[in-house]
Amino acid sequence: MSKVFVGMPAHAPAGVGALHASESFPAAARTALADTQLRRNLGAATTTIRAKREAVVGELADWEQLRLAGQAIKAATMARLDEHLIRLEEEVTKRGGVVHWARDAAEANRIVTGLIQATGADEVIKVKSMVTQEIGLNEALAEAGIAAWETDLAELIVQLGHDKPSHILVPAIHRNRAEIREIFLREMPGVEASLADEPQELAMAARAHLRRKFLTAKVAVSGANFAIAETGTLVVVESEGNGRMCLTLPDTLITVMGIEKVIPSWTDLEVFLQLLPRSSTGERMNPYTSMWAGITEGDGPQEFHLVLLDNGRTAVLADEVGREALHCIRCSACLNVCPVYERTGGHAYGSVYPGPIGAVLTPLLTGVLENPSLPYASTLCGACFDACPVRIDIPSILVHLRARSTEQTRKPPSAEAIAMTLASWVMSSPRLFGWAGRAMRAGRLLARRGRIRRLPPPLSAWTAARDAPSPPRQTFRQWWRHRDGGTP
Amino acid sequence: MTARDEVLARIRYALSAPADPVDPPRDYRRTGEHAPGAPQLLQLLTERLTDYKATVHSATPQTLGSVLATALHGTHRVVVPPGLPEEWMPASAVVDDGDLSYADLDTVDAVLTACVAAAADTGTIVLDAAADQGRRAITLIPDRHVCVVRAAQVVQSVPELLTRADPRRPLTFISGPSATSDIELQRVEGVHGPRNLIVVILND
């Protein structure tokens, strides 16, 4: 990593949070692909959600106009990001909130820990939030002796299962109902062995488990889907009511949000409140959306803190091609349509942001050298762009990052590069080409039923992930000569 | 340098060649085909809410009393906000003066409120914590929420809905009862929020 200068955009530092993959995507994907249960669970869930999304998107004749508006609002916001954040700070402060700024994950964790300690609480309830996972807040709080209770059903499943999230919207998408029942039986105190593996019953078990926590918690931590600069309004979109519980009942509310979540005006929200639920859960509208501006006397938390987080976002903003990734509203539509994600699941990406958007956002946040394999975790089929409600051109950013990764990695030439050089030499001479064609036929000895399953090294790198076809009995030139005696 | 100054300096560096601000195109549909309160909208709102497993009744000022009695059937204590219209007040009303504890609210059977607006397209009701809706906790903790929507409050589209809500007030947008899609992405109703949402559309 290069030295960071004061005032220069900086990448998200390693060593804290959940952005830095411990192994490369191909290595992690191999483990995931071998798990047939995982592939079945993912296949079933993504098929369900794709059909739901298509149905509700089809109801809106102006869907493309909404996407164009969403894209333009985000671009306009980023072009004046400093001004919008200052306005947001003013409005939140005016209404009794306190605004904090954090350069990176470690600083945000320190701020939140300090705020909780100041209240005297040793536990907090949490609304599902991508950003607090990104910065590893729960781990930081645990080190300070503060217990963090995840209240979203899927987050709860992940937390109780000592597991990692694998999807932006449904972090436990890799678990099926039977596995979830097992986790509840094992980890939830007071759950009866008669618990059925019906989603309805499992949801009721979660309700009973968290009820007392909600009614007695003193401090809650949330993220934010949107923050409206001109009014200081924070917006949290959810389904279960756990969000409302956390945002309404405790005395103190601490909201952590990435600086890119700000939108300029109340009117802008009308676009995103149409794009997000339909893209995300495939609903016309999610069951609950909560909004608040600072503090309201006699209603809800009487102490409100907003933590504005950079953690690599300014480095993304500095990348003129990549900055579009900051437009993401975390709907997860791109995950659900991605042929790669559908087979590997989210864990293989090694970051809290999986799928197509994660393959661009993660290396942009950390610097591409920290996650060099992620821009290749895609077939560039373009389904993600078509599904994206704010029209992020993910395929173009992937190609851009591949180029950047190649430029920045000065390694000895790869086997592929050597093979290509060799091929270009052979193909430049008719005599060598003819000789090589005949030599290829030796490969027939390795083939079984027309396919070669394993080639010797270094060609084994090719057959590790796919079969090679058996070379033909004769070369094209031989066939051409014998066709009609060699006359054209 | 404070964190604030540094983050702002980084943003300005990153935007060293800022693009001219472009006004976002707003040629999406902003107003519906029907005027607020039109019978088509009341019909659509009913369908949308029912689709997401809310119960919907319609009432006139004359039938409201009996419709509310049906909606509140089986309840013993019903919490109501301090500004609920007198004529809606059930016999079993417990008026929230702001002193009811969360534990108290967890023992009442239902809550009865008004709302500030509703959108037919999405089946969404908006509460803004005004006197006829009360503080947010009272519509959250009880397991049954009965909400009266006046016909004139029903608009068609989401943009129209937002023009009727004040972003400086605490707002709750409700589209059906509490639900989750977290298990195999199948929607099931009833998690932490009220498991029963009963909407009474009042044609007055």
Image: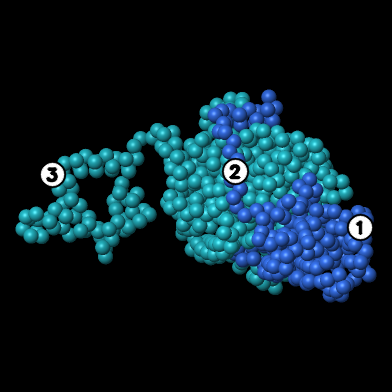
Chain colours: A cyan, B blue
> Closer to the camera, A471 or B141?
B141
- Residue A179, horizontal then vertical, whole percent: 60, 65
Mark 1 or mark 2: whose residue is earlier in sequence: 2
Q: Quadrant of the N terminus of chain B?
A: top right
Q: Is residue B191 visible?
A: no
The chain under label 1 reads: B
Distance of mark 1 from mark 2, alpha carbons? 42 Å
| For discs 1 and 2, the disc positioned in front in the rendered view | 2
Element under disc 1: loop
Residue linked to disc 2: B24
Where is residue A194, by image quadrant?
bottom right
The amino acid pointed to by label 3 is Arg
Element under disc 3: helix
Where is residue A186, by image quadrant?
bottom right
Would you say the residues marked 1 and 2 are in contact, meaning their CB atoms lie under 8 Å apart? no
Residue linked to disc 3: A431
* Badges 2 and 3, same chain: no
